Image (spheres, rainbow, N blue to C red):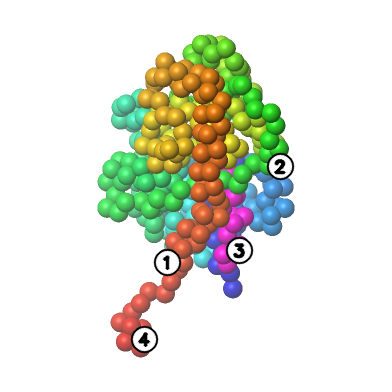
Amino acid sequence: MATRVLITADAVGGVWQYATDLACALPALGFEPTVAVLGPEPSAAQRAALDEAGIPLIETGLPLDWLCDGPVPVREAGKALCALVRERGFDLVHCNMPTLAANGAFDVPVVAVAHGCLATWWDAANGTNLPPDFRWQRTLTEQGFRAASRVVAPTAAFAAVIQTTYGLTDLPIPVHNGRRPLTIDAGEESDAVFTAGRLWDQVKQTRLLDRVAARLSVPFHAAGALVGPHGEQVPVDHLHPLGLLGEAELAGWLARRPIFVSAARFEPFGLAVLEAAAAGCPLVLTDLPTFRELWDGAATFVAPEDEDGFVAAIEALRADPAARAVMGAAAQQRAERYTPAAVARDMAALYASLLAPVATPERSAAA
């Protein structure tokens, strides 16, 4: 009988892609995944993709921690999820929102995945400790990590940050994220520059990219929202904003292999970078430990906040078609490491280790 795994997700950002790609890869390894979505409802296209793959979807109506004003709704969401696990007989919970595990009330093993957290984001964005109004999120996150059976991070570099930030005894287990390659019909190469992500998020440094765009003689396209869920806004004067793109639209832009740029100064993994690399786009990235871990030798790195450096790196690739082709091919080859199948293999091994019978002295003697 297949092991039943409940995978939590939200329909707002990259966690949805991670969770659903993983869910679609697990059945081949003997697991029966169900995706439980919290926060805003998934779109019709998101529902259809899971339905087509035969993956059950539970729309819980429960809140996301980063959209809450205090700890009570998050704790209540954790209790509701515990009840759901008991009622439906799941064998294991894969929790992509570690705060849900803060109550420590699950009767089955819990894997908590640290895709990011407010405390580490705040430090990168502001260089200060969390203000009092947000400290409850740090507390619940730490409680969730400590209550979980295992903690996982998408890179070894971010695992080290999480361990230091929360004083964890054990280093979180690094399991690199994966992404199913977009369906791309490669077209004529575009002499343009491209970025994608949460443009409103200050750690993405959209303002810096806007200044870079002002100094280029080619278009610099930017896909993603300029307004955040709490009203955060980033005005742009020189970037060409494309808004939120569907998968097919994004594939169309990447098919022409523009130079892909990320100037983020905080990025636990970076699924948008992986999507661009898989399409063969040459990469220009901030010199972060996480990006070095994933893309060293397959990208051009620029020091954080170095506007001149980003302009120079972009212009160097534009001026040297041969180097541009080499870097695009290197990125595409490296992207082949980071697949949902690879994530599923690593997570399946972790699930199995948590579900294996505990060896008692009696069992050992019998063996």
Q: Nearer the viewer, residue 78 or 108?
A: 108
Q: Which quarter of the figure has residue 332?
A: top right
Q: Which residue lies furthest to the bottom in this view?
A: 366
Name the kind of residue labelled 1 in the image. Ser
Residue indicated by mark 2: 45
Label 1 vs 4, first from the N-terminus = 1
Mark 4 lies on residue: 367
The region drawn magenta spans 13-32
Tell me the quarter of the image containing the C terminus.
bottom left
Real-space CA distance between mark 2 and mark 3, rounded to the nearest whole angstrom: 24 Å
Q: Mark 1 points at which residue?
A: 353
Residue 194, x across and y down, in percent: 57, 25
Residue 265's x, y, as percent? 40, 28
Element class at badge 2: helix
Amino acid, disc 4: Ala
Q: Specify the amino acid type for callout 2.
A: Ala
Badge 1: how crowded within 10 Å, few (<14), some, or many (20+)? few
Residue pointed to by mark 3: 28
Quarter of the rendering occupied by the N terminus? bottom right
Gap in Å between the C-alphas at discs 2 and 1?
A: 35 Å
Relative to residue 201, is residue 111 depicted above or below?
below
Q: How crowded is mark 3: few (under 14 residues within 10 Å), some or many (20 or more)?
A: few
